[in-house]
Each structure stands twice: as C-alpha cells, then as structure tokens.
Image (cartoon, rainbow, N blue to C red):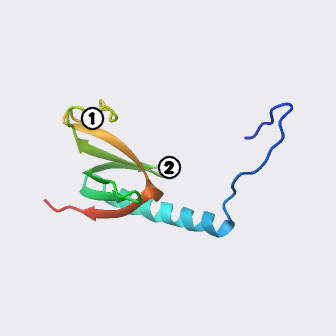
C-alpha cells in the first residue's frame, strides 16, 4: 500500500539491492526454523550490538523471536503476559539482528 501527500515530491533515501534482500530473507527463514524447532528450550542469545539475553524461546513469528526472560524488578521496558508465569517477562527480538543463539542444557 502506498500513498502520496499532495505537494510533496518523493526521493528514495535508501533501497536495498536484490542480493541483500535475498540474503536477509534467507537468514530470517533459517533463524525462524531454528527457533521454531527449539520452542520451550533455554538459550543464550547475543545480538549484533553485543547485547546478551538468556531465557526460554516461547515463539517465533514474522521475523520476531519471543523470549521469556526471568522477571527482575526495575526492568520497566519488559511487559508481562497473561499467558506466562509472573516470574517471566516476554522480550521481543528481531531475528536478523541475532548473532549467536546457544542452546543451554539443564
């Protein structure tokens, strides 16, 4: 869906090349399959920005990974869900920003 505002000209600021688009789609699809196969498993995730999260994969949908992380008071950026325990909060991560996913054995 696109629209044009009256009186404005359009100038493309960035457009991904077809090779990059295919690469990103392939990575997203591969990560989606990996995450879907490991639902309810505990993992350690490192993002491209070197942030590290540990938690339980609870779902994967449309390029997003849903990770249940232990609830820690003072983390206002996370929101709980009525579908999960009060001890966990759900963190949403973008699949193509993930650098390392490590399965944690218990």
- Whether 35 is drawn above or below 61: the answer is below
How far from the left and from the top, in percent, is residue 14?
69, 55
> Who is closer to the viewer here, 91 or 40?
91
Comparing marks 2 and 1, which lies closer to the viewer?
A: 1
* Residue drawn where x is 62% and y is 63% of the image: 21
Q: Which mark is residue 50?
A: none
Q: Residues within 10 Å of mark 1 (few under 14, many from 20)?
A: few
* Residue drawn where x is 48% and y is 52% of the image: 63
> Is the residue under label 1 in contact with that under label 2 (CB below 8 Å)?
no
Q: Is residue 68 left or right of residue 49?
A: left
The residue carrying mark 1 is: 75
* Residue drawn where x is 42% and y is 62% of the image: 31
- Whether 94 is drawn above or below 100: the answer is above
The residue carrying mark 2 is: 62
Q: Is residue 23 left or right of residue 16?
A: left
> Who is closer to the viewer here, 64 or 10?
10
Q: Quadrant of the C terminus?
A: bottom left
Q: CA distance from mark 2 to mark 1?
A: 26 Å
* Residue drawn where x is 47% and y is 58% of the image: 96
Q: Residues within 10 Å of mark 2 (few under 14, many from 20)?
A: few
How far from the left and from the top, in percent, is residue 64?
44, 49
Single out the residue that lies furthest toward the right: 7
How far from the left and from the top, in percent, is residue 68?
28, 44
């Amino acid at each position: 869906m696109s629209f044009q505002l009256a009186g404005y000209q359009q100038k493309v600021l960035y457009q991904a090349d077809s090779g990059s688009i295919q690469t990103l789609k392939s990575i997203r699809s591969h990560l989606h399959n990996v995450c879907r196969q490991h639902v309810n498993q505990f993992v350690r995730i490192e993002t491209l920005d070197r942030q590290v999260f540990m938690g339980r994969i609870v779902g994967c949908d449309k390029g997003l990974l849903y990770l249940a992380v232990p609830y820690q008071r003072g983390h206002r950026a996370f929101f709980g869900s009525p579908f999960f325990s009060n001890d966990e909060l759900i963190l949403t991560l973008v699949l193509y920003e993930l650098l390392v996913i490590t399965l944690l054995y218990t």
